[in-house]
Image (cartoon, rainbow, N blue to C red):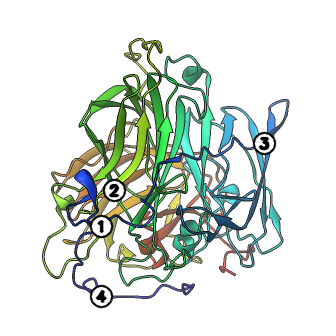
Amino acid sequence: MMNSQPVRFTRRTFFRGAAVLFAGAFLSACGTTPRGYHGPRRALPIPPLADAVREGSGVTFRLDAGAVDAAILPDATTPVWGFNGAHLGPTLRVRRGEEVTLQVHNGLSEMTTIHWHGMKLPAEMDGGPHQPIEPGETWAPRFTVDQPAATLWYHPHPHGLTGLHAYRGLAGLFYVDDALSDGLNLPGEYGVDDIPVILMDHKFHEDGTLDDIEVPDLGLKGDVATVNGITNAGFTATTRRVRLRLLDASTMRFFNLRFSDGRTFHVVASDSGLLPEPVPVEHLYLSPGERTEIVVDLAPEEEIMLEAAAFPENLEVPEDEYALDFGLQDRFELLQLTGPPEGTAVPGALPAQLAPVPELDVTDAVEREFRLNTFEINGELMDMTRVDVTIDHDRPEVWTVVNENSDWIHNFHIHNAFFHVLSVAGTQAPIWTQGPKDTVALPPGTTVRLAVSFGQYPDPEWAYMYHCHMLFHEDQGMMGQFVMVEPGREADLGEVYGHTGH
């Protein structure tokens, strides 16, 4: 179990380990098959759509967090956590304009929180470290959805324990629909041609139980990749075109995603919503917390593999005996896709236009700088009683985020916001920057300038977070707080329950 207070380590604690090599034409020539990849493909589990009680413009969901047993590996039962009696959680699906109530019951033996990642909403409803849910208690946040269609997600956020709780399985997707997305000619039947794909990685003991002992500087980086909670997954399509909603829900792992035949596929959405137009690519980088929606066309009965490939430039992390092994040379077979039967209808062209670019006027905008170094932001570790930034206006800001480390990767996530990446400097790695985002990757030495748009819910007593979404980094202190207030007001976290982290 992790300590609740940040622990400092030197940045070069361990020598870089050897990359994990796997058997088969793609995985490796070493002659062994990794655990969990023996035997036939297993049908990709599709998280159920959460039961919803709708009345007028209101919708209510219930999430029960608890301990469950899961078949992550084909040859063992693994005690994990999840929601509503299953590993991971159901997919929540809402529409813009709906008033959402989430009844979150904690059936675990310890405190947790649940954060609605990517949602613009009042800070008191955000589910960050200031909203603890004690064992046996139910927390019922309520808010109105006021943002465009997007693939969001939910996960724990207890200070110092976020990585451990997420690693054990408290995670699920949160879809937002709107009138614009309804009218697009994109695959949209949930679980049929619109497929949730939750990527994680784990470590296992011989008996199949999770190894949740953290490694200094690398936390809970695993050596077995999973999709929707299992290894060796396969999906047989019934249509010639499928939409994959990809989420990197791992605690520390970056994925370089491609298909086994190198085919072109199209990115249609980023973290916070649709792109202006489909973007053709042959590979795609995802960092922890990032989402992307892709569309891929399949020939009848063909088999292709969604793979995690090695990063050719190692994300510009030095490859020497002292650098940490972030797993950037690891390779995984993630999800086998099988095409539909012969005679299945050929899809029409993808829409040429998807969504207008939200206009963010940053003329004379407030500018702020955030310097990430090891486990600190601007030279400080997270303090739940300290307000780092107060925002007293309703305009976008420009945030410059710098990875000062020469041999560590980071990324950066902002609550209650989306942003456009204005510029990238200091790296040639093809990190994804297009479209509306809430999380961006930062290779060593990288600087990004972000035009940030915030949800307008001023409240001097409650804080939002910004942090590295590599969860071991976050848990060790790489996180700060901002408070939104009316013009002329000051932030005052006061003595609101949870502000001291108990």
Tell me the tag on residue 51.
3
Single out the mark in the foreground, 1 or 2.
Answer: 1
Q: Return the x and y of residue 386 as percentages of the image width and height.
A: 55, 76
The residue under label 1 is 32
The residue under label 2 is 332
Label 4–label 3 contact, CB within 8 A: no
Instruction: Say which amino acid is labelled 3.
Output: Asp
| Residue 346, visible in the rendered structure | yes
| Residue 355, visible in the rendered structure | no
**Mark 4 vs 3, N-terminal side:** 4
**Mark 1 vs 3, N-terminal side:** 1
Q: Is residue 173 above or below residue 490?
A: above
* Front-most of residues 264 and 116: 264
* Front-most of residues 490 and 1: 1
Q: Distance between the residues labelled 1 and 2?
A: 13 Å
**Mark 1 vs 4, N-terminal side:** 4
Tell me the tag on residue 10.
4
Q: Distance between the residues labelled 4 and 3?
A: 47 Å
